[in-house]
Image (cartoon, rainbow, N blue to C red):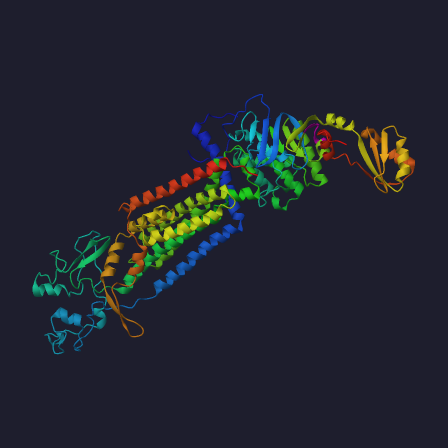
């Protein structure tokens, strides 16, 4: 029983998952912290492709992810990763990559050291781990700075280091908790491309966000959580269509709201206007998409000056309130 | 790629080894980046250096020689010390009677020849054996005068001019014939006993207790807790590795830092004091065994404390408050173990067992310690204080500190058995704490 000083050759004794079981399976899972409910009777199975987990802050997205990451234990219900209870057996994590919403990293390490060290926890040898780490850092476009200390990285680079570390074991399931939060637009685009690419590679990716547009740019398959409950599950277009069928508002800021209101009333998509305050005009429509397409033309043809256009309804909260039946 | 099938233990071991070394290296590098690590380890080194300076100072001072038997005095003023006159049979009270009147005349000895002229001679570390040699002849001359009699065999063992050790209660005492080994060298005795007192006292209090508890308090209690509070624990947890393994490998990282530190520090102190200390050769080799025992005790104690503090840090973020209570208890029990080792209450502590290990090794390296104490206690002396007063002392200088810090092996009577039992107790405590820690940590939710 000599220590494996040479650290060469492949790691042995791979864990075999049960075939044909979903990567993630939750059966009536609830989680409460004292009297506060974090997750309420969620049943869900996810396998293959990119799934966007959508919900406002405090909806239970992180609770769900922490349960999947084996950090929290469900108060009720069963959780299975590749058919195995992650709380009892850490083996499924050899096929899972998890990116926490927490921004902490070992700041004193270089990106390469960080990914290499953690890769070794999957049983890779020193050399294998290093090769793998270089590969994933190249994949997230950090190869040229991989020998710099993480502490000197920008927010977007830190997120990518975290993503790289989660990819180092070629995971079949990748869990990304708010990977776009706090990133600049360039970093967002890079990270979104990485996620789309992973989906194209056939991996199961679950990515959470509280911003609908972000998720829409990544995937069509979404899960909506609110107050710990599963609200909707399916294709984002279906949900969009559902949303389009309900009355929408567009707010315009202009110096002559009444005159502009008359112009809009002539338009067939518009069924009403009103004036909440001076210099403000709100248009009500059943077909937001069509109106949005025509909006610039209508405004320029009318000749009035418009200083701001806003969609007060088009945020997650109003979608959620519509889905929960409290819509306007 | 073709691979030969490997035996199962090899598979398990090599995989375990890869994860173990990864976490061990991570832990060590984490220590390296933390300022607190360097601060704590430096404080330990400074503590040792300062204490060694005091030791060097003490070893360079000289204890004035005392004429314990008073025979360097020339009572009758004839120029001959009383010891010389007694030996040669002339009167110490008559100036007209002295060896200068012999044919041929014998010149007078100097006064110094009759100070420290009858040192401790003993060879057998057994109770009851005849010991000692009357170097200055003031007992042996009586044999010529009176033959065997109670005059020269006060201890009634039918051997004239000797002494033997005997048990008096729990202590060893000297039962001596008159004027045997009665005027030893104070400076040599003081330095020998002070040296041993230093090794034992500093070893037990400084190394084993103070460093043994403070190093793990600062370096081990955060092994898991800091990862939780930093929010970096999930990098280790959401991996195909059990939490028990994480705990174990983190502890291994701690051991890899702290154990070499203790051994290096003990070796450094052992080498300095080995060269500086009183010795018939150039180096006190037998001391190295004691220093090894001190390092071993410090290592095991710091391991047991580490598992304890790590567990408390894992249970609750304010678990360290409980560590203060435990620290006070451990301090009290350490002091009790040093100064009142027979008290059984101290066995309900961790520090006690470290002290037993040091005592075990000291008895292996210096089997004559309790006889030295008995001799020191049997030799009384008068000294002149700087203000001219004559002070009576019923023991040799250095006896008291040595008898405080030294202790015999009271557990089994055999030093090696004591050491083995104590090591076993400490390791068992560490294993039990580790099992408690892992059963808590395994079910702990991390936010």
Kindly identify the residue that appears in the image at 85 percent across and 36 percent down. A274
Q: Position of residue A240 (x, y in %)?
A: 75, 28
Which quarter of the image is occupied by the C terminus of chain A?
Answer: top right
Q: Is residue A217 magenta?
A: yes
Q: Position of residue B397 (x, y in %)?
A: 29, 63
Q: Is residue B240 magenta?
A: no
Kindly identify the residue that appears in the image at 39 percent across and 59 percent down. B52
Q: Which segment did they paint magenta?
A: A216-223
Residue B31 appears in the picture as rendered? yes
**As rendered, which of A114 and A28 lies closer to the eye?**
A28
Q: In this rendering, is residue A253 above or below B286?
A: above
Q: Position of residue B326 (x, y in %)?
A: 43, 48
Q: In this rendering, is residue A35 above or below B175?
A: above
Q: Position of residue A253 (x, y in %)?
A: 84, 40
Which quarter of the image is occupied by the N terminus of chain A?
Answer: top left
Q: Residue furthest top?
A: A20
Which quadrant holds residue A65? top right
Which quadrant holds residue A195? top right
């Amino acid at each position: 029983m000599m220590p494996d000083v040479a650290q060469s050759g492949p790691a042995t004794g791979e864990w075999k998952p049960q075939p044909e079981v979903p990567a993630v399976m939750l059966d009536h899972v609830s989680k409460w912290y004292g009297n506060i409910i974090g997750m309420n009777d969620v049943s869900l199975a996810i396998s293959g492709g990119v799934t966007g987990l959508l919900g406002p802050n405090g909806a239970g997205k992180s609770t769900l992810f922490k349960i999947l990451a084996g950090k929290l234990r469900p108060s009720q219900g069963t959780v299975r990763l590749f058919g195995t209870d992650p709380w009892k057996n850490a083996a499924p994590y050899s096929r899972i990559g998890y990116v926490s919403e927490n921004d902490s990293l070992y700041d004193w390490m270089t990106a390469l050291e960080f990914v290499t060290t953690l890769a070794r926890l999957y049983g890779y040898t020193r050399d294998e781990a290093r090769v793998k780490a270089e590969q994933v850092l190249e994949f997230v476009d950090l190869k040229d700075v991989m020998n710099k200390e993480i502490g000197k990285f920008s927010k977007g680079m830190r997120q990518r280091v975290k993503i790289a570390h989660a990819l180092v074991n070629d995971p079949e399931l990748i869990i990304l908790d708010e990977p776009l939060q706090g990133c600049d637009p360039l970093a967002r685009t890079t990270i979104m491309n990485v996620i789309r690419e992973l989906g194209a590679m056939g991996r199961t990716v679950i990515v959470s966000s509280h911003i609908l547009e972000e998720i829409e740019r990544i995937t069509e398959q979404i899960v909506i959580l609110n107050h710990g409950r599963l609200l909707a599950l399916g294709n984002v277009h279906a949900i969009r269509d559902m949303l389009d069928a309900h009355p929408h508002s567009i707010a315009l800021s202009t110096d002559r709201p009444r005159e502009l209101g008359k112009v809009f009333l002539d338009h067939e998509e518009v069924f009403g206007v009103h004036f909440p305050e001076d210099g403000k005009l709100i248009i009500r429509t059943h077909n937001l998409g069509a109106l949005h397409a025509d909006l610039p033309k209508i405004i320029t043809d009318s000749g009035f000056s418009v200083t701001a256009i806003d969609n007060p309804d088009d945020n997650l909260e109003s979608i959620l309130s519509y889905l929960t039946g409290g819509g306007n | 790629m073709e691979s030969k099938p490997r035996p199962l233990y090899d598979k398990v071991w090599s995989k375990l080894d890869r994860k173990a070394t990864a976490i061990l290296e991570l832990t060590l590098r984490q220590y390296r980046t933390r300022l607190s690590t360097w601060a704590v380890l430096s404080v330990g080194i400074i503590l040792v250096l300062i204490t060694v300076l005091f030791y060097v100072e003490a070893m360079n001072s000289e204890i004035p020689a005392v004429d314990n038997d008073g025979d360097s005095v020339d009572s009758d003023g004839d120029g001959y010390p009383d010891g010389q006159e007694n030996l040669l049979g002339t009167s110490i009270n008559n100036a007209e009677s002295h060896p200068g009147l012999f044919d041929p005349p014998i010149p007078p000895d100097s006064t110094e020849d009759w100070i420290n002229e009858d040192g401790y001679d003993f060879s057998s570390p057994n109770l009851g054996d005849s010991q000692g040699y009357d170097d200055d002849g003031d007992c042996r001359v009586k044999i010529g005068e009176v033959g065997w009699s109670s005059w020269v065999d006060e201890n009634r063992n039918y051997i004239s001019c000797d002494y033997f050790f005997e048990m008096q209660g729990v202590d060893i005492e000297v039962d001596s014939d008159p004027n045997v080994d009665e005027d030893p060298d104070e400076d040599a005795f003081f330095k020998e006993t002070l040296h041993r007192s230093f090794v034992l006292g500093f070893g037990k209090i400084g190394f084993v207790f103070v460093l043994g508890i403070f190093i793990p308090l600062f370096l081990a209690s955060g092994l898991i807790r800091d990862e939780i509070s930093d929010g970096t624990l999930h990098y280790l947890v959401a991996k195909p590795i059990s939490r028990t393994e994480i705990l174990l490998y983190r502890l291994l990282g701690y051991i890899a830092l702290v154990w070499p530190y203790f051994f290096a520090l003990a070796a450094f102190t052992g080498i300095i004091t080995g060269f500086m200390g009183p010795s018939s050769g150039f180096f006190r080799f037998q001391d190295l065994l004691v220093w090894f025992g001190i390092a071993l005790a410090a290592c095991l104690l710091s391991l047991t404390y580490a598992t304890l503090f790590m567990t408390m840090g894992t249970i609750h973020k304010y678990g360290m408050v409980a560590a203060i209570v435990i620290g006070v208890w451990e301090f009290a029990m350490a002091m009790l173990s040093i100064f009142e080792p027979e008290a059984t209450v101290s066995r309900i502590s961790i520090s006690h067992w470290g002290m037993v290990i040091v005592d075990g090794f000291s008895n292996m390296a210096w089997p004559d310690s309790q006889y030295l104490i008995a001799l020191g206690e049997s030799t009384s002396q008068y000294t002149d204080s700087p203000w001219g007063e004559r002070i009576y002392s019923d023991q040799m200088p250095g006896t008291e500190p040595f008898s405080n810090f030294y202790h015999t092996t009271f557990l089994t009577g055999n030093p090696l058995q004591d050491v083995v039992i104590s090591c076993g107790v400490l390791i068992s405590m560490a294993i039990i704490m580790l099992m408690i820690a892992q059963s808590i940590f395994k079910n702990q939710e991390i936010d």
